[in-house]
Amino acid sequence: MQIQDYKFKNVQIEVLLNINQLQPKQVEVQLSYKDSSEQIYKIINNSIIMNKQEDQWITNYKAVFEFHKYQSYRLDVSVDDNISIGSIQFQLGELIQNGTQVKTNNHFTIKLVTTLLQKGTLLFQHWAAENLLNTDGIFNKSDPFLQFYQWDDDQWNLVYVTEYIQDNLNPTWVPFTIDLGLLNFYDEYKNFKIECWDHSKKNPPRHKYIGSIELSYHDIMLSPSKKFALINPEHKNCGHLKLLSCQIKQEQNFYSWIQNKQIQTLIFMEFSQSSMYMHVKSHNQLNIFQQFLIIIGSILIQYNKLNTASLYGFGGKINYQNQELQFLLFYIDQFLNFNLIKWDSIDLSRLFKMPQIN
């Protein structure tokens, strides 16, 4: 698997459930999902059994947060013999922005809490190896490189690959950094995996396995020597990895920046004569400007607690008889009907704040 082929889970959602009146022996939630390109929810997991702690039922799951999508989730709650007691819906972007949300219905109250799993805590690492297994025969030596994997509770995912060192059984790789959340979701006891391979220049490549090790950040900190034996079921001794240096650095990334931030939405629309054909109203399909407003507006509105946007037009003149104004009136009516954006003003003189372009 190539690193870029996989979308890493970067947010954890904790679900805290209080049930009114009922006293069930078991509670389960089923998760469904759709994004801005989908019309219906699709089930993405089997039912998750919740754990009871005092008067609450608790569970959590990891998800992939993508800023550029409108990501909607639905949680269906059932008790005992799969008896449904309702469902709730929420938008992941809005939840990320707020940090917590509370949803209620007649039977239960759900509190959702998000935790970022990639927030700029970088682990600086400098690795070397000693006495590696030679897989290239007596006339050559292995060309070793390392692959780092995270365990996301479902599968191992490749998160980083080092360069290969040619003809060297005692290599030292270039230092690098990985977001600690990408390695272990900020759980110092959670194992990640390092695999050591002999690089192949063939096309397609046929890398040869040298050995691997599973360890946690806690294991690294407890080890006096920072030296770890590689394991290969087919070879008794395949060498050691040694951590020459390790340091944690703090850097704010986009995910941590967007949390608890408000995005002010300003939309600028062209009404010049040359663009009129793109404003044409059709009963069969939305025009280009309408499609743009629906796609962009549905994403940005998640990060705007006021649920408002400002619309500015340019290239037209304020004339109650001209065609540009009729198109503008149509846009306002269209989006009030969609309930997508509540315009902070529909004062037409305020909409044309840009310099006039004839």
Image (cartoon, rainbow, N blue to C red):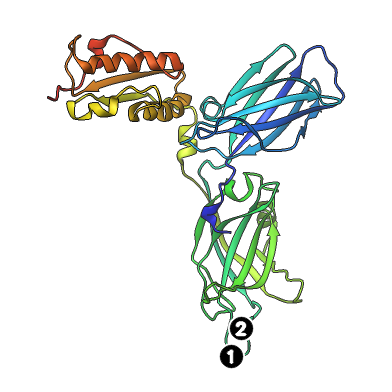
In percent of width and height, residue 256 lies at 49, 36
Q: Residue at x 55, y 79 (%)?
A: 168
Q: Residue at x 78, y 24 (%)?
A: 78
| Residue 281 placement (x, y as % from top left) | 33, 22
Is residue 7 positioned above or below 298 on the image?
Answer: below
How far across and down, in percent of the image, does residue 251 sit?
46, 44
Give the label on residue 139, or none.
1
With respect to residue 74, does 175 lie above or below? below
Residue 343 visible to an observer of this rendering: no
Q: Amino acid at mark 2?
A: Asp
264 or 181: nearer the viewer: 264
- Residue 136 position within the rendered picture, expressed as x and y whole percent measured from the top left: 61, 83
Residue sitting at the far front: 284
Q: Sort mark 1 into few (<14), some (14-19) or many (20+) by Cα contacts within 10 Å.
A: few
Quarter of the rendering occupied by the C terminus: top left
Residue type beneath disc 1? Phe
Which residue: 69% across, 69% down? 230
Against 26, is 351 above or below? above
Residue in the foreground of this view, choosing between 241 and 297: 297
Rendered residue at 54%/32% (across/down): 71
Determine crowd level at label 2: few under 14, some 14-19, many 20+ residues with C-alpha closer than 10 A. few
Q: Residue furthest bottom?
A: 139
Is residue 24 shown left or right of residue 60? right
As drawn, the label of residue 66 is none
Q: Quadrant of the N terminus?
A: bottom right
Residue at disc 1, secondary structure:
loop
Q: Are marks 1 and 2 in contact (CB under 8 Å)?
A: yes
The residue singled out by tag 2 in the image is 136
